[in-house]
Amino acid sequence: MSWRDTESVAVETADSPGRGPSSVLIRRRVDNDAIGIWILSRISMVVVAAATGWLFAVNGQDVIGWLDRWAQWDVHHYRGIAIHGYEGQPTGVPNEAFFPGLPALLWLGAQIGLPHVLTGLLVSFVAGGIAAIALARLGELEGGRHAGRLAVVLWVCAPPAVFLAAPYTEALFLGLALPAWLAARRGHWLAASSLTALACTVRVSGIFLAAAVGVHWLVTRRRHRNWSGFGWLFLPLVPLAGWMFYLKQLTGNWLAWMDAQAQEWNRELTPPWEALSNTWQAAFGGTQSPGFAWMFGAELVAMLAGTLLTAALLWWRRWGEATWVGLQVVAFATSFWFFSVPRAMLLWWPLWVGLAVLASRRRWVLWLYLAVSAPLMVVWAATFLTGRWAG
């Protein structure tokens, strides 16, 4: 079965008969493979983080502590929200730009005596493991056990994979979003919508996930012409409405998170051609330092990948997945410049599943990918862990 043939699977899995013992055994093996790959990749990231702290220490200064190496960039904002809440600007920026899911968990960890950064690392570790299992199961649905295993390998070796380990939102979001999509594939709409609602508390990407789940529900209506599960699709609106109501009470602005993004991160609405021009100028116009210029070049590559992926998903009539990736591409393409797109690629499970299916049939795809991606992953991790801009 090819990747492009699997629209029918998206419909049929909703009412497929119970799996026999052999299928359960295969799934258990897929899960074990995913967890094993995830744990081994965490060991690799620990090695990179340990070496980076010593090899990149500034002359005359002490080696930065283990936890402090992970306290970079947005981690300060998440920690600031966990300590001070959303009132004022304790970290120097309007923190309404950040959704409350991860800061709430950091606050909870602090209540039992855990440092905020350690809590964030543990959250990413656990949530990432859940995401790895769900990703492997999605890969297994498309191309068998081997494809499921490869999807996890490709994902954990992605260039910006350090953000799956850091106290950032990527792992936590995927730990909810991937099981949500898996539940939608199986027609379990209450579970899919509940997990999507939780994902909406973590990052704005939850809105795009809710839209994708809704589109997938429509796709399944081709075979099941009833309204089963329709009401649950609106469940993600509950946390979003609650968040916006809170912001209204706090700032007087229903969309304070959007205005904060525009104010501090230049995410104001911009025509795509201007966004492309601004990003190109930042990458190659000599207006940025070498590190930032290189990362803006990576933004261009990531946007190209997202555009091609969306086009391919539309061609293959993978409407739900195309909605998921395409809405993000549109959002990035209409900001002042392309920003944090490589990190967002970690969320594009159709990319990892599609590459895994291809690599399971063309082994050279795997070797070529690893030859390019693995070194970049190490460089990206060292960049982040030393406080340099990593997207």
Image: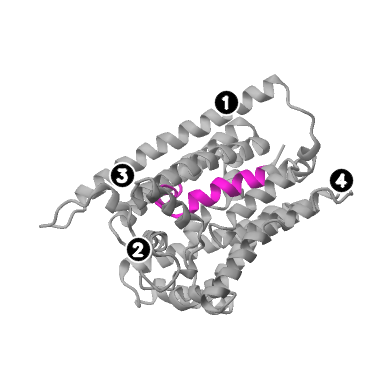
Instruction: Inspect this view and state whether residue 311 appears.
Output: no
The residues colored magenta run: 158-182
- Tell me whether the residue at label 4 lies in contact with that at label 2, contact meaning CB atoms closer than 8 angstroms: no
Instruction: First in sequence, mark 3 or 2: give its number.
Output: 3
Instruction: First in sequence, mark 3 or 4: give its number.
Output: 3
Q: Nearer the viewer, residue 157 or 371?
A: 157
Please tell me how crowded label 4 is: few (under 14), some (14-19), or many (20+) other residues with Cα within 10 Å.
Answer: some
In the rendered image of this protein, does residue 254 appear above or below residue 345?
Answer: below
Q: Which mark is residue 13?
A: none
Residue 267 horizontal/vertical position (percent): 51, 74
Judging from the image, the colouring scheme is one colour
Name which residue type carries label 4: His
Residue located beneath label 1 in the image: 29
Gap in Å between the C-alphas at discs 1 and 2? 38 Å
Residue located beneath label 3 in the image: 48
In the rendered image of this protein, does residue 89 appear above or below residue 195?
Answer: below
Gap in Å between the C-alphas at discs 1 and 4? 32 Å
Quadrant where the image shows the N terminus: top right
Instruction: First in sequence, mark 1 or 4: give its number.
Output: 1
Disc 3 versus disc 4: nearer the observer? 4
In percent of the image, x 64 and y 66: which residue is there? 241
Residue located beneath label 4 in the image: 224
- Tell me whether the residue at label 1 lies in contact with that at label 2, contact meaning CB atoms closer than 8 angstroms: no
